[in-house]
Amino acid sequence: MAHTVRDLLDEVRAFHGELSKYYLACSATTSEVRARMFLDFMAEHELALSEAMAEYEVNGSPDLLNTWIKSPPELAWRATEDERTLRPESTVDEVLTVVLRFHERIAVFFEQVATEPVGPRVTELFEQLREYEQLEERRASRVAVEAEREM
């Protein structure tokens, strides 16, 4: 089924928004203080990414946003059962593993869209988004290390 670039960005916006809610819910039940700090940070961070996507959908180039992609990949935001591994006693490392898994899912989605034969502007946008997502993975890793050092 064909979608516009705007539709795909909206899916990513929703994915980030749902991750924010998921991390907040996990934070509310965790007994590990450092894991809670990291989850709170990630919840705020995912919300900011969701808001940034929403802003791009409003302010981006209409020509680019309205470009149709014939058969784009699917980005399912719901955590699968084996991804819902966070427990109240989860450590920062366990939380980071889940966070990185979700960021990787988004990066792969961007990479797959970038390879669709729709034109250089779409390819460039999704390659830049993939690179940014990979930067976010590294940032999450640094924040997790800092959370482990706290306290």
Image: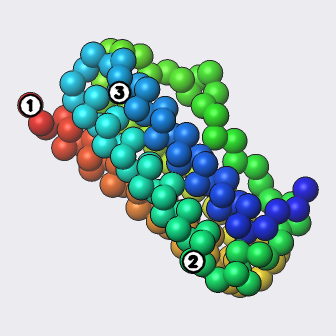
Q: Residues within 10 Å of mark 2 (few under 14, many from 20)?
A: few
Q: Which mark is residue 151?
A: 1
Cα distance between the residues tagged 1 and 3: 17 Å
> Residue 104 at what x, y percent from top left?
54, 49
Residue on which the image places disc 3? 27
> Residue 2 at what x, y percent from top left?
88, 62
Which residue is found at the position 25% from the left and 20% from the top?
32
On screen, 46 above or below 71?
Answer: above
> Residue 115 at what x, y percent from top left?
74, 69
Cα distance between the residues tagged 1 and 2: 42 Å
Closest to the camera, between mark 3 and mark 2, is 2
Closest to the camera, between mark 1 and mark 2, is 2
The answer to the question of whether label 1 and label 3 lie on touching residues, with beta carbons closer than 8 A, is no
On screen, 140 above or below 53?
Answer: above
Q: Residues within 10 Å of mark 3 (few under 14, many from 20)?
A: many
Residue on which the image places disc 2? 59
Q: Amino acid at mark 3?
A: Ser
